[in-house]
Image: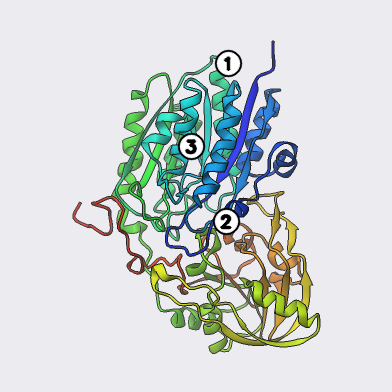
Amino acid sequence: MARRKIVVAMMMHETNTFSPVPTPLASFRPLAGEAAVAEFRDTNTQLGGFLHVARELGAEVSVPLAAGAHPSGYVEKGAYEDMCEAIVGAIRTGCDAAFLALHGAMVAEHVDDGEGELLRRIRAVAPRLPIAVGLDFHSHMTAAMVANASVITGYRTYPHVDMGETGERAGRTLARALDGEVEPVMVWGFRPMLTSTLVHAPSRQPMKDVVDLAIAAEAGGAVLNASVFGGFPHADVPHLACSAVLVCDRRAEAGRALLDRLLDLAWERREAFLYRGAPLATQIAHARTLGEGPIVLVDHGDNTASGGTQDVMSVIAEAMRQGLEDVVAGPICDPASVQRILEAGTAARVTLPLGGKVDMPQIHLAGQPLTVTGRVTRITEGEFVVTGPMATGTRVRMGRTAVLDTGAMQIVVSERRSEPFDLGVFTHCGIDPRRKRYVLIKSRQHFRAGFEPIARHIVLCDGDGCTSSDLSLFTYTRRRRPLYPFERDL
């Protein structure tokens, strides 16, 4: 029997349409062929999971594209077209199946539904091709995705520690279909509501019961796969919602009652899915009253993994104003400051305007650098391999990185953006966050993968930035109407 040929590809981006950070092709660091396999084989990523299943099947694997960028603004048209053509072109030459690691919240300059459009183009050249798709928990599910895929699965954790498992779930269901064991059909739906990324983690209520119900249905064989998607609120697109998709065997009707149960339960709890913040000064003052550290201060208004610039200084400035000591903070993305530090050299004492280099016109926020004086204590290449539970085995590339020690605070400054979900952002440059009283990081939930296990206390900090949870800061012009909580009488 001839070996099956499977096209395995990754095209991932979570688009914050309010972010000023550009997203050219270079942001995706596109790889292909053996270089892509070497980068992602045996990693806890969707692509790693798909490669694992393909290896189990003894398939011939073609990887035309492995591309993923940190969340940021609209994907440039040329970048989107180049990546789509790489994948569609490989499928056009012929294959038995496709395994696609996608995000579900990609918005290009000219395309609202990046994933749905890619799948539509694939279907145009391969109408009957079996296609397995993995998606992020923050996907915006669309009819185009469901109509043009064979199997869809999504992450069931946040932080996303099941990325590899998600690829394997989709790949194995499709493998069963290739062997004739099952005939996947999908049902999907949504409820017109936003869920805050700070409160919709599947491990905690109000989302826990919803996702647990989906997991139990899949584990018990009621459906082949069941996935719930919290959505990504920092995107002004018509398909913004909370959604779910079920993969059924042969009969779609088998999943419709479960689909309604999942979505109705989420809808009943819609009020609980909203985040209610507090003044930043009050949050920092509260942190000062807490006992032994590490006390993790989470600056979620400027989170790279939601499209933040990673250079807003409001939380660091408030921590300094209130006199916090024994603090490690960062990383701050500021290439100009890194260059200044490199020119000064290790052990030099420098004064510079740190951060605040990027304006955010979409939310009427100008960049505000913070003048900082400190001693340069470490300079690194900014690379390390993740050892924590999220994206295990992948290599993080922060660009050249330096540590600036003000006395009360050690600030990590990098050339590139990188959310601190792994302790390596600090340990690779000689700082052990477990020994600090305060650990100030820019994150929303992914920090919990690496930092929650070491934290004595966690304090959410409502800093400024284009990933703020204050929806009143954002002007939505293209969203669906009605949509909760903008319209409450639904």
The reply to whether discs 2 and 1 touch (Cβ–Cβ < 8 Å) is no
The answer to whether residue 56 is left or right of residue 22 is right
Residue sticking out furthest to the top: 1
Residue shown at 43%/42% (left/top)? 228
Amino acid at the residue labelled 2? His
Q: Which mark is in front, 3 or 2?
A: 3
Residue at point 26%, 59% (across, down):
486
Disc nearest the viewer among 2 and 1: 2
Question: Which numbered circle lies on residue 70?
Answer: 2
| Dot 2 or dot 1, earlier in sequence | 2
**Furthest residue toward left:** 489
Q: Which residue is mark 1?
A: 179
The image shows residue 53, relative to residue 319, as above or below, that is: above
User: Disc 1 or 3, which lies upstream in sequence?
Assistant: 3
Could you give the CA–CA distance between mark 1 and mark 3, rounded to whole angstroms? 26 Å
Q: Secondary structure at mark 2?
A: loop
- Find residue 118 and name its label: 3
| Residue 36: percent from left, percent from top | 70, 41
Pick whichever, 279 or 368, lies toward us: 368
| x, y percent for residue 489 | 18, 55
